[in-house]
Image: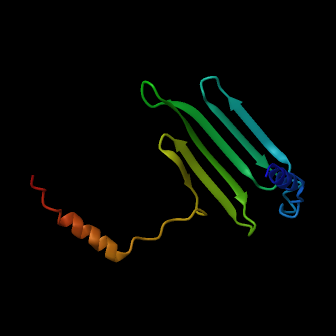
Amino acid sequence: MKLLILTALFACACADVSHIVGAGDKDAQVLRQDSNVGVEGEYNYAYETSNGIKAEESGSLKKIDAETNAEVVQGQASWQSPEGETVQLQYVADENGYQPQGSHLPTPPPIPEAILRGLEYIRAHPPPPEKN
């Protein structure tokens, strides 16, 4: 079993994946790169590459209560899709979780009309209180 896992890892490491990377991506250069880390839990970074990838992020420590701290992060990134469209992503990550926004992200379908009517009926006609 160990030999099988080792062989699979070796095969993955030796695999030629150069055909996956686009022609402009393998020769991309870093045009700008900034980073700053503070001693109180704050940081920020930004970079931009010659193939159109851009990203910025900043974070800081937030006191939730007397015993709990949380890192609060805000950022954005953009890149070109294989179809040539610019993809933009904005996000916040805090004590409420990761919250991305972008037009490329899937959205839930609308709630069907029959379910909306049923929910409205339940709201308008609450069940009677239970008797002990």
Q: List x then y, in percent, for residue 127.
A: 16, 62
Res 82 quadrant in image:
bottom right
Q: In the picture shown, does residue 104 fall above or below 12?
A: below
Residue at screen point 58% across, 58% down: 102
Tell me where residue 79 appears, x and y as whole percent: 72, 57
Q: Nearer the viewer, residue 11 or 58?
A: 11
**For the image shown, how many numbered marks are present on the structure?**
0
Residue found 72% across the figure and 34% down from its top: 35
Residue drawn at (19%, 66%) of the image = 124
Q: Indicate left or right for 44 with 94 as reference.
A: right
Going by the image, does 113 lie left or right of 106?
A: left
Percent position of residue 94, x then y: 52, 41
Residue at left offset 84%, top offset 62%: 22
- The picture quadrant where one finds residue 106 is bottom right
Q: How is the image coloured?
A: rainbow
Residue at the limit of the structure toward the bottom, as seen here: 114
Q: Quadrant of residue 81?
A: bottom right
- Furthest residue to the front? 1
Residue, far left: 131
Query: In the image, is residue 36 above or below residue 6?
Result: above
Residue 68's x, y, as percent? 47, 29
Q: In the image, is residue 100 above or below residue 124?
A: above
Left or right of 107? Residue 85 is: right
Image: 60 above or below 125? above
